[in-house]
Image: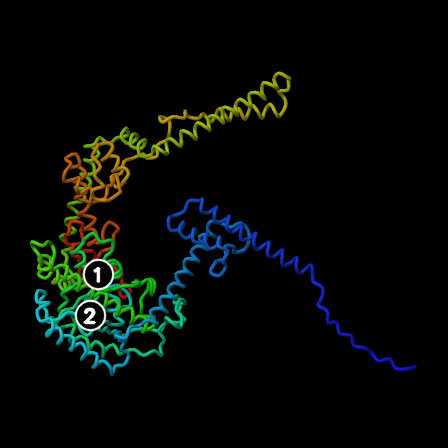
Amino acid sequence: MSAITPKLTLNLRPPAPDDRAAERVADATKRKKAAQETDVEAIDRVLRMSLTDKQREMVEELRQAYGSGETGNRPALRTAGGTISKDDVIRAADALLRQRQADARADRVAETLASKPANFHIVTDDAELPAFVERLREECRRQMREWPDRWAMLGVKSLTANDFEGTGIDTYIDVSIGYSVWLPLLDEGYYLPYGHVDMRGAEGFEFLDDMSAYKATDRQLTRSKVLAAISPYLTQSAHGKSFHMGSARYDLHVAIKDGYEIRGCVWDSLDAMNSLNEHEESFGLKPLTAKYGRLFGIDGPVFTFEDMFGNRSPAPFNIELVGIYAIKDVLYGWRLTEWQFEQMKIAPSAEKPGKLLECYAQIDSKLPETDVFLARSGFCVDLDGLAALENEFEPLLEKARADVFEAYEIDDAFVRKMDRTINAAKVADWIEKQRKRIDRNTEAQAKQLAIISECEAQGKTNLKKYTSAVDRLAQLKAENLAPADEDHAPLNVTEFSITNGNHLAYLIYDHLGIRDRTGQFKRGKTRSTAADVMEAYYEEEEALKPLATVAAYEKLLTTYIQPMLGSAGKSSIIEVDGRVHSEFKAGGTATGRYSSTGYSGRPIDILREFETEE
């Protein structure tokens, strides 16, 4: 028998197509398409629901993303299957918005870092500080030579734009992390960083990436050496400084916390803009630059603080990024300041040019330093005197309130008529629903009567059907529904409240017939009972005198006395140093008067943990 040699056969033909695999792919595609269509339908269903303006805008963006069929940045709607709810859609819309904001911010960061101008200098070596100081001195020397009288009206020999970056915006707690300045004749800007912190990996700072984050290995300056370098210049009143501060006077507060006081702060470009045009939509530096920049040489996109860093401190961000942003700030600040100065020179008219600048130079330019001095000094308060006034005014307020009820004859009939007026829609809704209830009751009674008559005619009154109908008829008659009319509609309001805006509006506009002049104070609004509108009415309408008396006592007690004393359930605004501290704002009211707001940034009971029992 001969040996049999096994033969190896190679099958080089392609395998037959797997029909089931192709079917599975097709089914998956169909399911994906069906799911997408279902998601779009769910979004459309939510768009037909009641949404806030912001929610509707977000959901419409989500609808566009799903409708386009793109899947790249499209958040998932479904969490665990089942019906897609309104909350699911809003959550996904919010996620889409956040992702787009993050993507846009990343693009802006990359663009900013890639386009740093050659005359933007970010100093990170302490050894370079003397050279910076010399450039600052050279700017002052050049201005005194080339612009010998330009700033004479402001009482200074030179002028630069300055700014501090900080850990936040609280004028008493937050501290500076960097200083920037624009030197106009030298045409260069500087940023001196000294307080950036590495927050990578910390809770709440997951948004930081390698491009935008400050790293502990990154170089920055020593705080004490920077302050020693810049304070001699910033404390010189002969050399002027411009800031974009407004009411908070943030930069001047920061300097005091750093151990020196800025002198020569003769220009606040926010307040100057308010003097030029008090009706600006926004007085922020970036909105003003975006609006007027073409007039003073700023073209292209103007990124806001939130565009770059969101609603947070710049401290954990990359020094190069913050530095470019900070130098752009002082460049914008300088160009805006210079433009405002020239505009004030020719305002208010050709016949009287320079009057606005003269006014600003003699009054407004002195306010920043004065305001900060007042704010930090605070005011001593006679608490015993205020307590005596509280005891005097409280019974007078109660009497004034009682006089309102008597003067306007506010009784049950008044309250009922007021209720029917301000709740007319609710009353009409109740009448319609009551009519339907009566109709249903009448139909149900007729049905039960028919059953009863049928059983009685057939002599089957012993059946459960009969007894049930008798019991149900009794129940329906016992409902004793009130007639569906206004007289029988329940009251939504049972008493008049002088602090209720709707009640007050009825009394003023409906009961007393005072002509509505809200539009003179608040564009597009009607029937206002806001304090500023009411004050104008009180001056002109004799019929409102009882209300004016109540308002006067309430303002004295709730605005001036009780917040100081910490009485009537209010926390005292007296700070731990025993004084009241306010922030001042020139032109802070619609009439251009000075205004002040109390400081509310830190808890005044912070020292209670150190109290001991006697």
Mark 2 neighbour density, 10 Å: few (under 14) some (14–19) many (20 or more): some
Asked whether the viewer can see residue 468, the reply is yes
| Amino acid type of the residue that numbered disc 2 sits on in the rendered structure | Ala
Closer to the eye: label 2 or 1: 1
In this rendering, position of residue 584 left or right of residue 494: left
Report the quarter where the N terminus lies: bottom right
Judged from this view, the residue extending furthest toward the bottom is: 127
Mark 1 neighbour density, 10 Å: few (under 14) some (14–19) many (20 or more): few
Q: Which of 165 and 161 is in front in this view?
A: 161
Q: Quick check: 603 above or below 125?
A: above
Asked whether the viewer can see residue 613, the reply is no
Rendering coords of residue 242 (x, y %): 17, 66
Q: Nearer the viewer, residue 216 or 96?
A: 96
| Amino acid type of the residue that numbered disc 1 sits on in the rendered structure | Leu
Rendering coords of residue 92 (x, y %): 46, 55
Q: Measuring 8% from the left and 69% from the top, which residue is drawn there?
A: 149
Task: Give the Cα distance between marks 2 and 1.
Answer: 32 Å
Judged from this view, the residue extending furthest toward the top is: 457
| Badge 1 element | helix
Report the quarter where the C terminus lies: bottom left
Residue highlighted by disc 2: 255
**Mark 2 or mark 1: which comes first in sequence?**
2
Residue highlighted by disc 1: 295
Rendering coords of residue 400 (x, y %): 18, 39
